[in-house]
Amino acid sequence: MKAPYPKISVITASYNQGHRIEETFKNVQQQNYPNLEYIVIDGASTDNTLDIIKKYETFISIWISEPDTGVYNAMNKGIAMATGDLIYFLNVGDSFYSDNVLLKAGEFALKYNTADLLYGDAWLLYNTGKVEKRETAYLSKINLFQKMICHQTIFAKRRLFLENGGFDEQYKIKADYEWLLRNIFKGATHKYIDLDVCYYEVEGMSAFGYSKISVFESPKIVEKYFSPLAFKFITRFILNTKVTGITTSHLRSKLFLSLCDKLIH
C-alpha cells in the first residue's frame, strides 16, 4: 500500500496586499494537494485584505490578523501554528510554477524521506517583465558562503524549526540565509529535486525598503558561521582561480563540495 502524502504546511505572510492576495489564494487552491495545511499570517492590514481572507476562510486552515514586527516575525508565528511534516513559505506576489508542484514535492518527500531539506529550481520575475530560470546550485557550505539559494525553492521538515529554532528576527532581510546556514552547520541533510517550484519576484522584498540592508547583513552572517580559518581556506584555495585554474567545474562537483563541507566546521 502506498504511503500517504506527507502533510505540507504552506505559510503566507501579508500586510496590506489586498490588491493581489486573492491571486495567491487561488494559486494555492489550484494545487489540489490531499494533505495541505494553509496558514495565513496577516500583520493587521488596513486595506481590504481581511475581506478577501474571509472569502477564502473555508479553504484557509488557520489565519490571524494582528500587528507584527516584520516579515520574519510573521513567519515565525506561522511556524508555531504549523503541524505539517514539511513547511513551505509562499509570499504574496510569488506563485507555484504549476498546479502539481505540491504533489510532486510530496512524492519526492516520500522517495527521499531521510532528507531534512528538499530544494528545486525557481523562475525569477523582474519588474521589467523579464522571466528567467535559476537552476539551484548544489546546497553546500561553499556555495552558501557565496550566496543564499532562493528560499522559495525549499521544503523544510518542521522538525528543523522545532530542534534548531525559527528565524532570527534581528535580521530584516537575510534571516532565511542565517536559518539555512545554521541548519547546514548543524548537519541537516538535503536533496536536490528536479522540480520547477515557483515564480519568484526578484524585487519583491525591495518594495518593503529592505534591499539595501542585505549588503550589511550577509557579511555578518558569513562571519558568524565561517571561522577565520574557513574563510581563508575558501577564498584562498577554493575560489581562487590562480590556484584552481580558470575552470569552476569543481564548484559543480557534488563530491568535491561534500568533501570540502566535511573540512569546514
Image (cartoon, rainbow, N blue to C red):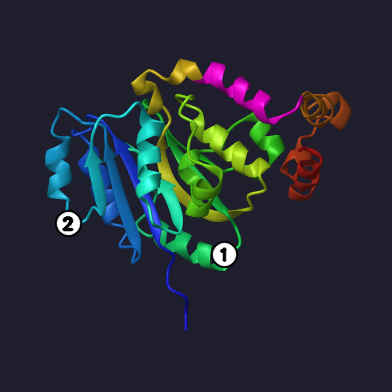
Q: Secondary structure at mark 1?
A: loop
The three-letter amino acid code for the residue at tag 2 is Thr
| Residue wearing tag 2 | 58
Q: Nearer the viewer, residue 141 or 136?
A: 141
**How far apart, in angstroms, are the residues tagged by discs 1 and 2?**
31 Å
SS majority, magenta:
helix
For residue 200, side relative to residue 53 (left or right):
right
Q: Is residue 163 magenta?
A: no
**Residue name at image x 45 percent, y 28 percent:** 169
Name above or below for residue 152 compared with residue 62. Answer: above
Picture quarter containing residue 99? bottom left
Q: Nearer the viewer, residue 229 or 124?
A: 229
The three-letter amino acid code for the residue at tag 1 is Asn
| Residue wearing tag 1 | 113
Where is residue 56? Give x, y as percent: 17, 50
**Residue name at image x 26 percent, y 50 percent:** 62
Magenta span? 214-227
Where is residue 231? Give x, y as percent: 76, 26
Neighbour tally class for label 1: few under 14, some 14-19, many 20 plus, Cα within 10 Å: some
**Residue name at image x 51 percent, y 53 percent:** 159
For residue 16, side relative to residue 195 (left or right):
left
